[in-house]
Image (tube, rainbow, N blue to C red):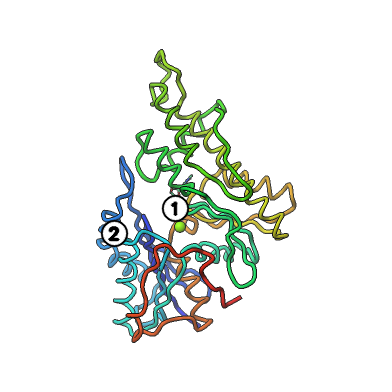
Amino acid sequence: MSIILGIESTAHTFGIGIVKNGKILSNIKSSFTTEKGGLIPLEVAKHHRENKERIYFESLEKAGISEEKIDAIAFSQGPGLAPCLLEGIKFAKEISLKLKKPIIPVNHCVAHLEIGQITGARDPVMLYASGANTQVIAYASGKYRVFGETLDIGVGNFIDTFARYAGIGFPGGPAIEKLSLTGKTLIELPYTIKGMDCAFSGILTNLKQKLESGSPRDDSDEPSGEPNYKLSDLAYSMQEVVFAMLVETAERALAHTGKNELLLGGGVACNSRLQEMCKIMCDERGAKFFVPSNDLLTDNGSMIAYLGEILFKNRDFILAKDIDKVDIAPRQRTDDVEIKYK
Ligand code: AMP
Ligand code: MG
C-alpha cells in the first residue's frame, strides 16, 4: 500500500497528482496560455511558482488525504525547460524535507508511456506526440528504445508555431484542430519522413510562405487579388499530411518490433483526427489501439505519480537526507533511462 505524489513542471503545465496502488486519486493542474505569442520560459516558471501551493493543497483535498499520508514525492526530472524543471524540483525537495519522505526522479517521456497501462496497454509501441517531443518508443532489452523521432522540432511546437504565424496564441493545437474541421481543399505540402524519423521545419516554412502569399488570413471570402490559401484549408491539409507521417512511422515500428499494441501519448494525441488515423491503421493490421483520456495525454502530475509508484515499489528512490545529490536533467533522453522494474 503506497501513496505517491507526483509533480509535473517540464514546460507549460504545473500539475500535481496523487496515486494510490495504481489508482489516480487526484490530478490537478494549471497550464500557462497566451492570447498571442508563444512560451517564454521565465514567464512560465513564474506561473509555476505562483500556482504550486494552490495546486498542492487542491490535489490533497481532491484525493481526500492529509499530507502526512504521502509515502514519497515523485517529480519530472527531465527532459524539459530548465527554469520550469527547477520550480518542480525545488518544490519536491521542500515537501520531501518537510515530510521526511523520499524523493523519486522520473523521466517525463517514460511517464507518458507507463500511464498507458491504465488503458490496458501492456507492451505497446508508443507514438509520443507532444509539444517538444515526437518519438516512436517501445521496450526492448532493459530500456525504452527510440525507434524513430523528429529530426528537428516536436510536432506540437510545429503546430503551435504555425498557429502563431496565423495570429493564434498558445496552445495552437486545439484552435488549429477546430479550424481544420471547416477545411475542404487538400493543399499539397512536403511529406518529410525517412524510415521512422520525421522532420517538420521544411513544412513549417512552406506553410508560412503559403500564409504570407495571400490575404485575407481570417477565412473571409473577400477577393484579395493575390494567390490565396484559406487558413482552414491549410490547417486541414497540415493535419492530414503531418499525421499521416506520424502514423506511417508508428506502423513501421509495429512491423519491425512485431508488437501488436499502439499507444498514443502527449498533448497532440488529444487530436481526434490523429486518433482516428491511428485507429484505422491498427484495425487494418489487426493491432490493438490504446489512447488515454485527454487529461492524461497532456502533461499532468498523475502520470509522474503513477511511474513514481512503480519505482517506489522497486525501491528506486532517494532518501530525504540525500536530496542534495538530486538535480534536474533538462536533456535526458528516453533511452538514457535504465528500466529496472521490467
Ligand atoms: P504536451 O507537451 O504533451 O502537454 O502537449 C502540448 C502540445 O499539445 C501543444 O503543442 C498543443 O498545441 C498540443 N495539442 C493540444 N491539444 C491538441 C489538439 N487537439 N490537436 C493538436 N495538438 C494539440
Ligand atoms: Mg509531455
Q: Is residue 118 left or right of residue 3?
A: right
1 or 2: tag closer to the N-terminus: 2
Question: Whereabouts is ligand 2, in terms of quadrant?
Answer: bottom left
Crowding at label 1, few (<14), some or many (≥20) Cα neighbours within 10 Å?
many
Q: Is residue 338 above or below residue 109?
A: below
Residue denoted by label 1: 132
| Amino acid type of the residue that numbered disc 2 sits on in the rendered structure | Ala
Q: Residue 45, which numbered label?
A: 2
* Residue drawn at 37 percent across, 60 percent down: 29
Q: Is residue 268 left or right of residue 68?
A: right
Instruction: Tell me where residue 164 appears, x and y as whole percent.
Output: 37, 38
Q: Is residue 242 above or below residue 299?
A: above
* Residue drawn at 73 percent across, 60 percent down: 258
Q: Say if disc 2 is inside 8 Å of ligand 1.
A: no
* Mark 1 vs mark 2: in front: 1
Q: Nearer the viewer, residue 55 or 332?
A: 332
Quadrant of image for the C terminus = bottom right
Picture quadrant of residue 16: bottom left
* Residue drawn at 31 percent across, 41 percent down: 35
Instruction: Tell me where residue 21 appears, x and y as whole percent.
Output: 52, 76
| Amino acid type of the residue that numbered disc 1 sits on in the rendered structure | Ala
Q: Say if disc 1 is inside 8 Å of ligand 1.
A: yes
